[in-house]
Amino acid sequence: MRIVAPEQVRDSLDFPSLVPHLREGFRSGATVPVRHHHTIPKSEEPDATLLLMPAWQEGGDVGVKVVTVTPGNGQRSLPAVMGVYLFLDGVSGAPRAIIDGPMLTLRRTAAVSALASEYLSRPDAETLLMVGAGALAPHLIEAHAAVRPIRRVLIWNHRTERAQALAQELSGGALAVSAAPNLQTAVGEADIISCATLSQTPLVQGAWLQPGQHLDLVGGFTPLMREADDEAVRRAQVFVDTREGAIKEAGDIVEPIAHGILTPDTIVADLLELSRRDDPLPRDAETITFFKSVGSALSDLSAAQLLVERL
């Protein structure tokens, strides 16, 4: 059995390869039970979460990710997300690989956003706003730039020094990267707005959005987490990675449904449906698109398959 370190995961899963591989994974499909979601109470910090995410293909591979999300790890200088991915032989059930869970999650999550952007953002999108400066942010920036002609990146974070540090880390390459001191102003300048935070209150206001923008919401993974307000939902065409997961787990979908702003039927499509279309999705240049990702074990399995093949 192979143990795959974070560096091997990152080096093996480049976005120009991973994004089309995920497209094929969504087209092919898999059995994906709704993930097990358990709250671990914490007395002096936000509660932690234990996630169990299995998926398998009939006659094919099997995988399960075991992840903890501990928001209080920020004060320990540790990542909020930790875990492992167990990749199993579909015939015998024998373990084939134990893969670093956080890096696999970072790469596949960013690749899912890039895949959605290929369908939903304008092909000429040049300016990306990254809301949040955590571990996922540089991967999202890299992934979006792999599928769109991004030239300029703005980074906003509730702690300005974090945004400045990430901008400095990413400077010197092909992208012009800078910290954005004001979120509303930055939203108005962006073609694509990608959010990866643990916020429980909306950050991006729908009133700020401009015609033709694409809003990519990645961070919220419970019904109590929000990165955009109801007005953003009202003004946009709404898409999700998986319908079943989004309408049960994503606050950016669950709350607008509860408020009567959205219904499950008015979600235009999920990634399974988008990837199986024979023709391009009709898109008016003025349309605002809203994509909410909560994470799917199908994308974990697909990414793990590509990784194991390459190793």
Image (cartoon, helix red, strand yellow):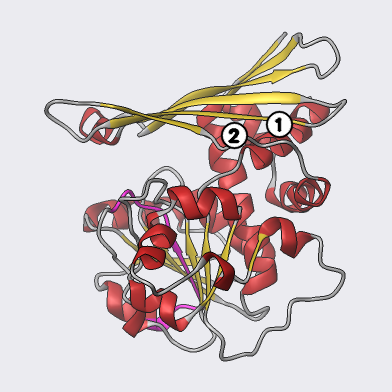
Q: Quadrant of residue 181?
A: bottom left
Q: Which residues are magenta?
A: 188-199
| Residue under the point 63% across and 80% down | 122
The answer to whether the residue labelled 1 contacts the one labelled 2, judged by CB atoms less than 8 Å apart, is yes
Q: Return the x and y of residue 116 as percentages of the image width and height.
A: 64, 63
Going by the numbered disc 1, the residue's amino acid type is: Ala
Q: Residue at x 50, y 64 (%)?
A: 216
Point out residue 154 in the picture as x, y percentages from the top left corner: 40, 68
Left/right placement of residue 308 relative to residue 108 reads: right
Is 194 one of the magenta-colored residues? yes
Q: Which mark is residue 304?
A: 1
The x and y percentages for residue 225 are: 32, 52
From the viewer's perspective, is residue 263 above or below residue 89? Answer: below
Write down the residue under mark 2. Answer: 104
Relative to 232, 75 lies left or right:
left
Residue situated furthest left in the rendering: 44
Question: Which one is earlier in the sequence, the residue at label 1 or at label 2?
Answer: 2
Between 298 and 307, the one nearer to me in the picture: 298
Looking at the rendered structure, the secondary structure element under dot 1 is helix
